[in-house]
Amino acid sequence: MSDGITRVLSIDGGGIKGVLPAAFLAEAETATGKRIVDHFDVIAGTSTGGIIAIGLGLGLSAREILDFYLNKGPAIFYQHPSPSSVWGRARAVTRKWLRSARHVVMPKYDPDRLRQALTEAFGARILGESQTRLVIPAYHALRREVYVFKTAHNPRFQTDWKQRVVDIALATAAAPTYFPSHRMPNGAALIDGGVWANNPVGIAAVETVGVLNRDRERINILSLGCTEETWSVPPRAGGKNLLLAAAGDLFLQGQCKGAIGAAKLLIGHTESDPRLFRYSPTVARGMFDVDTVDMIEELRSLGSSSGREALPLLNKVFLDKPKESFSPFHHSIN
């Protein structure tokens, strides 16, 4: 039986680095024998985090989602194990160079491989089939407005529940310069929600407090990142070359810190009364990238070890009681 605590799971964006939070959650499920979806009232995810959130909502185990990344990740990013022959290695280097050249003037990857992998995983299922409340950010670049997919956990949310989850996943993961925008059935051309909410913990807190009207003193949030890098901009640094090289990382870092701060304020988190728990291992700058699949095993190891270390807290704060029953306001008659 639910104890009146609202438990929220938030998962960052990060491309192939989604292996890390998927492995973290798989470790928790394996160790406890409990499904993540049965213990979280709200799950928010952006980009790769959105794909994980959708999978959990549809009832897939975290292990199944991890296997999706391990098995499909290399093909999605056009990379495979290094060939043994000289000619094979030469072809692989040539393909990598061509992708880099393409990246200068157009998206680096064609989305068809991602679409195929998602279709194999999710089929024709719709958001309305989720077993818990989902919040998945995207962005409408033409209108310059945020676009958030939500399950029908409020009477006002009348349309998103009908959308195919493959379309939602392609939209939230359409990272600029890596994938083209994704056009939804209603004509909206959407891009990655990471342009404004790569760490969706802020909007997860807003949704829980402002839309669900939950008692801010009875909310616990688990926030999972896809690594934090050990770097900073020197106080006297300047020049456009440095700015261009660091701009993306700077924006994501600042956005992440702001989202965490806003979420803590909204739910009344303090050092003496913690309610937001963040797990995102710190790594050396440049060690991982959003499309570097040759580090998958390292990401898996980081995620599993982080999940193992977090088990005492997870058992005490998040997996001790089941979530409350979720009955959407709008759903199919069939």
Image: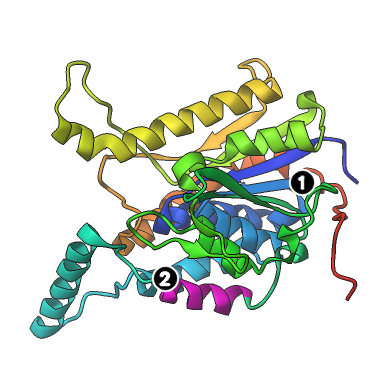
Magenta-drawn stretch contains 117: yes
- When the figure is inspected, residue 316 is found, relative to residue 136, above or below; the finding is above
The residue carrying mark 1 is: 41
Relative placement, left or right, of 255 versus 264 is left
Hey, what amino acid is under mark 1? Asp
The quadrant in which the C terminus is found is: bottom right
Quick one: 99 or 49, which is closer to the camera? 99
Q: Position of residue 219 (x, y in %)?
A: 75, 31
Label 2 sits on a secondary structure element that is loop
Residue 26 appears in the rendering = no
* Residue pictured at 66% horizontal, 60% vertical: 56
Q: Main secondary structure of the magenta part?
A: helix
The residue carrying mark 2 is: 111
Measured in 3D between alpha carbons, the distance from the residue under mark 2 to the one under mark 1, in whole angstroms, is 31 Å
Magenta-drawn stretch contains 50: no
* Residue pictured at 67% horizontal, 34% vertical: 205
- When the figure is inspected, residue 289 is found, relative to residue 63, above or below; the finding is above
* Residue pictured at 42% horizontal, 70% vertical: 111
Q: Tag 2: Cα neighbours inside 10 Å, few (<14), some, or many (≥20)? A: some
